[in-house]
């Protein structure tokens, strides 16, 4: 083997090593992003219709609530208190210290009616249309599904502790005809 062949062999090994290093770095970065920043979730139920449909796939920002507190109106992914291994998606309605009431399906926070533009047009509450008033304890949240007549939420199992929140839903990425920022 002459010097030219040795040099070509060295270049091939170097190129192969660079490719392998690039793949390893990409996998590590993907894992870090998946674990700490963005995570995909699948919607298995109709509790958030029409905002989220069954089989929608969403991306959840897991880092945002380390910077800013969860706010009313956010769509959040969390572990329900009765099953910490599960993941549920609901809309955050009220934070600690706020008083929540539902009257004929209308939402009241601290005695003032709150618009609910995310509910289906012509929505008529038939299940637990009247609820409360209840005051959300500090460090907890009150969540509801947008499909109020088909949602097991804080009306049934109580307040959501802050530690159970995984993150904020930010994007529907599948199916393609439903792609949009939330």
Image (cartoon, rainbow, N blue to C red):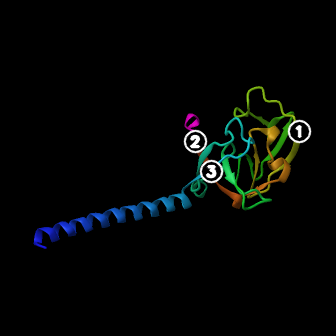
Query: Does residue 160 appear to the left or right of 31 in the view shown?
Result: right
| Residue furthest front as drawn | 1
x and y percent of residue 125 in the render?
A: 84, 34
On-image quarter of the C terminus: top right
Circle 1 residues within 10 Å: few <14, some 14–19, many ≥20: some
* Residue at x 10%, y 72% (from the top left corner): 2
x and y percent of residue 36 in the render?
A: 55, 60
Circle 2 residues within 10 Å: few <14, some 14–19, many ≥20: some
Whether pointer 1 and pointer 3 mark residues with C-beta atoms closer than 8 Å, the reply is: no
Image quadrant assignment for residue 50: top right
x and y percent of residue 60 in the render?
A: 59, 50
Query: Does residue 27 appear to the left or right of 72 in the view shown?
Result: left
Label 2's element?
strand
Query: Does residue 133 appear to the left or right of 5 in the view shown?
Result: right
* Residue at x 79%, y 29% (from the top left corner): 123
Instruction: Tell me the CA gap for discs 1 and 3.
Output: 31 Å
Residues in magenta?
174-179
Question: Which residue is disc 1 drawn over?
Answer: 130
| Residue furthest bottom as drawn | 1
Question: Which residue is disc 3 drawn over?
Answer: 41
Whether pointer 2 and pointer 3 mark residues with C-beta atoms closer than 8 Å, the reply is: no
Q: Earlier in the sequence, mark 1 or mark 3?
A: 3
* Residue at x 77%, y 60% (from the top left corner): 83
Measured along the vertical axis of the image, is residue 106 above or below residue 82? Answer: above
Residue closer to the observer: 141 or 154 = 154
Residue closer to the observer: 90 or 95 = 90
Label 1's element?
loop
In the drawing, what numbered circle is on residue 174? 2
Q: Which of marks 1 and 3 is in front?
A: 3
């Amino acid at each position: 083997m002459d010097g030219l062949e040795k040099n070509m062999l060295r270049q091939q090994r170097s190129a192969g090593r660079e490719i392998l290093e690039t793949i390893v770095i990409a996998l590590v970065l993907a894992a870090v992003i998946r674990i700490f920043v963005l995570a995909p979730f699948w919607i298995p139920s109709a509790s958030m219709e029409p905002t989220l449909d069954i089989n929608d796939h969403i991306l959840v920002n897991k880092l945002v609530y380390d910077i800013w507190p969860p706010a009313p109106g956010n769509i959040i992914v969390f572990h329900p208190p009765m099953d910490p291994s599960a993941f549920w998606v609901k809309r955050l309605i009220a934070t600690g210290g706020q008083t929540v009431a539902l009257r004929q399906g209308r939402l009241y926070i601290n005695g003032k009616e709150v618009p609910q533009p995310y509910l289906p047009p012509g929505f008529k509450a038939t299940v637990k249309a009247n609820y409360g008033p209840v005051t959300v304890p500090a460090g907890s949240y009150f969540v509801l599904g947008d499909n109020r007549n088909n949602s097991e939420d804080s009306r049934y199992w109580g307040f959501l502790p802050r530690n159970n929140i995984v993150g904020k839903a930010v994007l529907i990425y599948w199916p393609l005809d439903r792609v949009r920022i939330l």
